[in-house]
Image (tube, grey):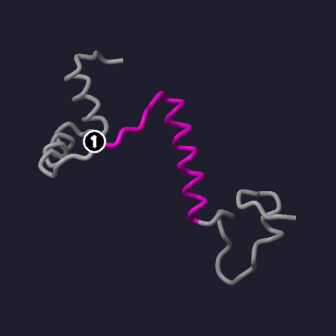
Amino acid sequence: MSVQPEDRITIDMFAPRGPGRPRSNPYDRSLQCRVNKRSQRRRDKARGLKRVEVKLPDHVIEHLDAACEQLNLNRAEVIELSLRHWLHLGED
């Protein structure tokens, strides 16, 4: 019988016993990150969000952070507001 890393049913049959506190999650850290990222992508897709990665110079980020502080918003919200204004899009 082979062991599947995401198997929750027979995890105790193959898990090594050791000293220390019991594990709160049967997965190792790298698998936890993959599972969490997968569920995050599903949530974003359900909300109609798309991922965009942008590289900006330091001075632009400093101005962006200042605007975030002033408006009490996070970077994504400030960037979205700026793009909506620049593209002449209304509020949804």
**1 sits left or right of 41 in the view:** right
Quadrant position of residue 64: top left
Q: Mark 1 = which residue?
A: 75
Q: What residue appears at the point 49 percent right and 29 percent down from the top-left corner?
A: 47
Give the main secondary structure, helix, strand or loop, of the magenta stretch: helix
Residue range of the region highlighted in magenta in the rendering: 29-54
Q: What residue appears at the point 44 percent right and 31 percent down from the top-left corner?
A: 49
Quadrant where the C terminus is found in the figure: top left
Q: What residue appears at the point 24 percent right and 27 percent down from the top-left corner?
A: 83
Question: How many numbered circles are shown?
Answer: 1
Residue farthest along the bottom direction in this orientation: 19
**24 sits left or right of 82 in the view:** right
Residue 17 drawn at (x, y percent):
75, 79
**79 sits left or right of 25 in the view:** left
Query: From what the image shows, is residue 40 above or below residue 50?
Result: below
Q: Nearer the viewer, residue 19 or 55?
A: 55
Query: From what the image shows, is residue 50 above or below residue 59?
Result: above
Residue 67 drawn at (x, y percent):
17, 40
Does the magenta run of residues contain 49? yes
Q: What residue appears at the point 31 percent right and 38 percent down from the top-left corner?
A: 76
**Mark 1 falls on what kind of element?**
helix
Query: From what the image shows, is residue 50 above or below residue 38?
Result: above
Quadrant where the N terminus is found in the figure: bottom right
Residue 41 drawn at (x, y percent):
52, 41
Query: From what the image shows, is residue 61 above or below residue 86?
Result: below
Q: Nearer the viewer, residue 20 or 76?
A: 76
